[in-house]
Image: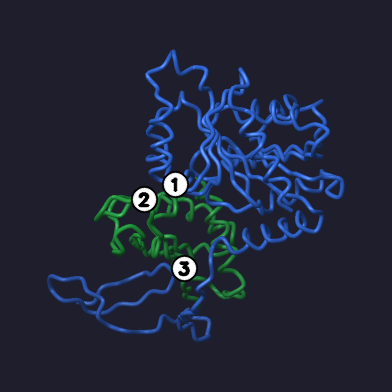
Amino acid sequence: MGRFHRHDDGTAHSHDHGEHEHEHEHEHEHGDHSGYTTGSERIEVLEAIFAENDNRAAVNRDAFDSNGIRALNLMSSPGSGKTTILAATLDALAGEFAVGIVEGDIATDLDAAKLEGRGAQISLLNTSNGFGGECHLDAPMVNRALHGLDLPALDLVVIENVGNLVCPAEFDVGEHAKAMVYSVTEGEDKPQKYPVMFRSVDVVLLNKIDLVPHLDADVATYIARVREVNPSAAVLPVSARTGEGMGAWLDWVRAFASAR
Amino acid sequence: MHELSLCQAIAGVVKPHAAGRRVDVVRVQVGALRQVVPETLSFCWTLVRDHAEMPDAELELELVAAEVACRNCGRQSTIESRWSVFCPVCESADVSVVRGEEFLVTSVDVT
C-alpha cells in the first residue's frame, strides 16, 4: 500500500512502492503548500573556488608592481628555520635593499619580535579566527597586512607563511616567487610526501646542514629527492646557525630583488 | 587542513548564483592533485552551510583523477597514487599536469 514520505524540504505525500525494492522511479514536483511552483532549477556555474583568492592576489601583485617591489612567499614546515634564515638575511642585506616583512603567525608575535631591530618594516598577521587559527596565509589576509607597510619605500617584501607543508602551497598571495626552507632534520622523504609544496617553489633552502655529522643524513640524497619532484628549482644547502652556504642564498635574493 | 576556508569560498561562489533562492544541491569538481580531503570537505560543509544561509544544500563532490603528460617519454597517463606526480610509464618527474588540479563549482540546484 501507499507509504507516507517526508522529504527534506518539509513536503509530504504518499505513493505505492514495489514489494521488495524501494525505488523512486516516479517524477513529480514537490509542492510547498504555499501556492508557488517550486520546481528545482539547475544553474551552470563553472567557477573556480579559488577565484576570489586569486583576484585578490592579483590586486596584491599590482600593488607590488606599481611600487617597484619584488615579493617572495617563504614557506616551510614548523621549526625548519624560516625565521632564523630571515633574520640573518635582513642583517646581511641591510643598506642594500629596503625590506618589508609580512609575518604570518597563528596567534603570537614571537617571530615578529625575532625580526625587530634589523632595519626591516614588519607587519604582523595573526591568522587566529576562533577555530584554532588558519593553517596558511591567503591573499585577502596578505592584502590587509600590506596596509601595515609603507610600500613606496620598499624594494622587497618577504611574506613569511604559516609553518605547514600542505595548505600554503594552494594559495597564491600575489608573490613573484616562492621559496621554501627544508631542514635535514625533517627526513629525506618529505619531497615525496608533500610534492605539491615542493613542486610549487622556485628555490629550496636545505637548512641545518651543520647537523649532518650528527644524523644519518646525506645532503646529496636530499638534493636528489627534491630534484625528483621539482627538476627546475634551485637547491641551496645552508646553515643559518653557522652561516655556511648563506652567500649563495643572499646572491639568489639579490638577483631576485633586482629583477624588477 | 584548510577545508573550512574552502567551504566558505564555495558558499561565496554559490551565493550570487542562488540570488536568494533556496539552494538544494551544490556540485563541486575536485581534482586528485588538490590537497582536499573529500570527507573533511563534506563535514566542514555541514558547518558552513547554515551560516551561509543555505542550510538545505547538499554538497556533491565529483572526483577527477590526475593525468600527466610526460616530456621524457611523450606519453599521457592517468596516475593512481593520490599525490604522486611521476610518469607511471618511465618514472620521470618531468611531467605537465593535464587533469587533476580542478577545483570548481560546476552547478547548483535552486528552488
Is there any visible trace of residue A12 in the rendered image? yes
Q: Chain of mark 1?
A: A
- On residue A151, the disc is none
Q: Residue B16, position in %: x, y?
A: 62, 72
Please, what is the three-letter code of the amino acid marked with disc 1? Asn
Q: Nearer the viewer, residue A196 or A96?
A: A96
Please, what is the three-letter code of the amino acid marked with disc 3? Val
| Contact, mark 2 vs mark 1 (Cβ under 8 Å) | yes
Q: Chain of mark 2?
A: B
The answer to whether B78 appears left or right of A39 in the picture is left
Q: Residue A110, position in %: x, y?
A: 70, 25
Residue at image position (16%, 76%) is A18
Shade representing chain B: green
Please, what is the three-letter code of the amino acid marked with disc 2? Ala
Q: CA distance from mark 2 to mark 1?
A: 7 Å
Q: Which chain is blue?
A: A
Which residue, given by chain and number where applicable, does mark 3 sit on? B26
Which residue, given by chain and number where applicable, does mark 2 sit on? B93
Q: Earlier in the sequence, mark 2 or mark 3?
A: 3
Q: CA distance from mark 1 to mark 3?
A: 35 Å
Q: Residue B111, position in %: x, y?
A: 50, 78
Q: Give the number of the mark in front: 2 or 3.
A: 2
Q: Is residue A194 above or below residue A116?
A: below
The answer to whether A207 appears left or right of B65 in the picture is right
